Image (tube, helix red, strand yellow):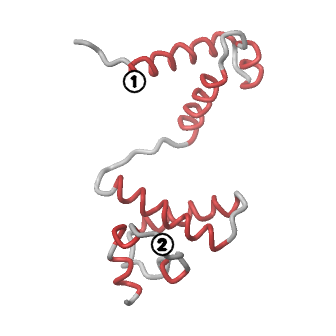
Amino acid sequence: MPKDEQMELGHDSFVNESFDLNSEFIPDFTNQCVWPELLQELLGIIKQTLLTQGLDEKQSESFALKLTLSIAEHMGGIQVYFPRGDKLHKQVRDIEIYNNFTGRNIKQLARQYHLTDKTIYEIITRMRTIESKQRQPELF
């Protein structure tokens, strides 16, 4: 089956993962008509990230393709906003602070994240509110 036809089959062709993905299944980045530019870029970012985490070239290509296909399958056709820069880093930081909070380590967290005690309390309060709303829907 030609490479273009393999890629047009989409995620369904990868449901049975009993075969080993190899470079013949990886999209050709020079052929713009095979995959949309956004998916090509996403594939490249994931692959590069996996390489920096110590995976070899073949594993990185295989996992990057599987992850890209999964993302496309679940989020395809919808418009998605990914926060970036400071906003994203603050959100991740706040989750880390909340997860590391024991009730007795405000000063330690403030030093660790270079924040004031008051800011740590505000983050904990905000994250508790978010968690509470996720676990306990409003009655009315």
Q: Nearer the viewer, residue 3 or 36?
A: 3
Q: Position of residue 46 (x, y in %)?
A: 56, 60
Instruction: Relative to 110, say whether 20 is above or below.
Output: below
Position of residue 130 in the picture relative to residue 124 (left or right): left
Q: Residue at x 45, y 16 (%)?
A: 129
Q: Nearer the viewer, residue 17 or 82?
A: 17
Q: Residue at x 47, y 77 (%)?
A: 27
- The circle drawn on residue 134 is 1
Q: Position of residue 37 (x, y in %)?
A: 42, 68
- The circle drawn on residue 59 is none
Question: In the rendered view of the protein, which quadrant contains the N terminus?
Answer: bottom left
Q: Position of residue 17 (x, y in %)?
A: 46, 69
Q: Residue at x 36, y 73 (%)?
A: 13
- The circle drawn on residue 18 is 2
Q: Amino acid at mark 1?
A: Gln
- Marks 1 and 2, the one that precedes in the sequence: 2
How many C-alpha atoms fall within 10 Å of the one at disc 1: few (<14), some, or many (≥20)? few
